[in-house]
Amino acid sequence: MEKKKKSLGSIFLDGIINQNPAFRLLLGNCPSLAITTLAKNGVGMGLAATFVLVGSNLFISLLRKIIPEKVRIPCFIVVIASFTTIVEMIMAAFLPELDKELGIYIPLIVVNCIIFARAEMFAQKNPPVESFMDGIGMGTGFMIAITIIGSVRELLGSGTWMGIPVTVNLFEPATFFILPPGGFLVMGLLIALFNKVFKVKDPRTIEDKEVGCCAVGCQGCANAANGGETV
């Protein structure tokens, strides 16, 4: 049975909730932990990754029918590296302080598994408009996730948010939360909270329902495999 085509809204929301890169798919953990000592770093990294995601998804989708299968991965890397270079130069020119703060993690967007995964699993298989929307959704979901992680760590570890003092008269900040162990703890708790609040289901189950498999259950699949005979 033909798989039901998703709407643009569903594709966008998938990146934020059902397939959130950081909280659901656990992709991009390196920048999610390394640069989230400040909330503004999460916003900056999220915007940079979104720019590269949208650009690479769109171009790879446009070129998907002419890129030879045997060299698709090198071609993907060239496209991703091109957009990463653009965003790196823009940040160095207009946001030098943020560029210095994020450091090596901006050029490392080239090998970010979120971006390459969307190129391989989505952009090369779908039209440009859907791929464009997928890039926006995944990028937005990633930015929201790492900004939340950065906000919690900054509040608890430094007593500030976006550099503004917040907890001066409430409690003494705990440096632990801006150290690597604190990053792992905060991220783990937020992942658990995210999945509890949204009660996110396994994406494979969602896809099965879209093609009608779950409507007949495993017995129906078994019957189909046996040419319709009851097993």
Image (cartoon, rainbow, N blue to C red):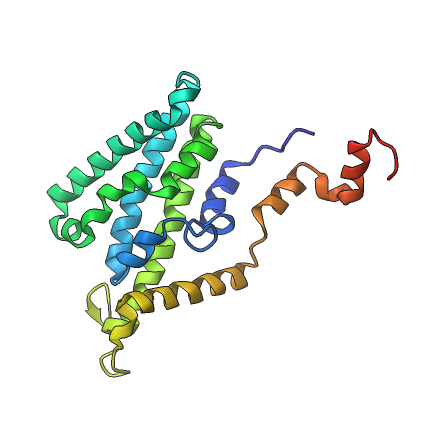
Could you tell me residue 73's position as x and y percent? 37, 28
Tell how many labels: 0
Image position of 97 with respect to 116: above or below: below
Image position of 33 with respect to 114: above or below: below
Q: Can residue 64 be seen in this view?
A: no
163 to the left or right of 66:
left
Residue in the foreground of this view, choosing between 47 and 174: 174
What is the residue that sits farthest to the front in this orientation? Answer: 70
Residue in the foreground of this view, choosing between 68 and 187: 68
- Quarter of the picture containing the N terminus is top right
Q: Can residue 213 be seen in this view?
A: yes
Residue at 47 percent across and 33 percent down: it is 122
6 to the left or right of 147:
right
- Quarter of the picture containing the C terminus is top right
Could you tell me residue 64's position as x and y percent? 42, 22
What is the residue that sits farthest to the right in this orientation? Answer: 230
Displayed quadrant of residue 149: bottom left
What is the residue that sits farthest to the top in this orientation? Answer: 66
Residue at 20 percent across and 48 percent down: it is 104
Residue in the foreground of this view, choosing between 11 and 201: 201
195 to the left or right of 229:
left
Residue at 28 percent across and 28 percent down: it is 78
Could you tell me residue 188's position as x and y percent? 42, 64
Image position of 31 with respect to 218: above or below: below
Residue at 11 percent across and 41 percent down: it is 93
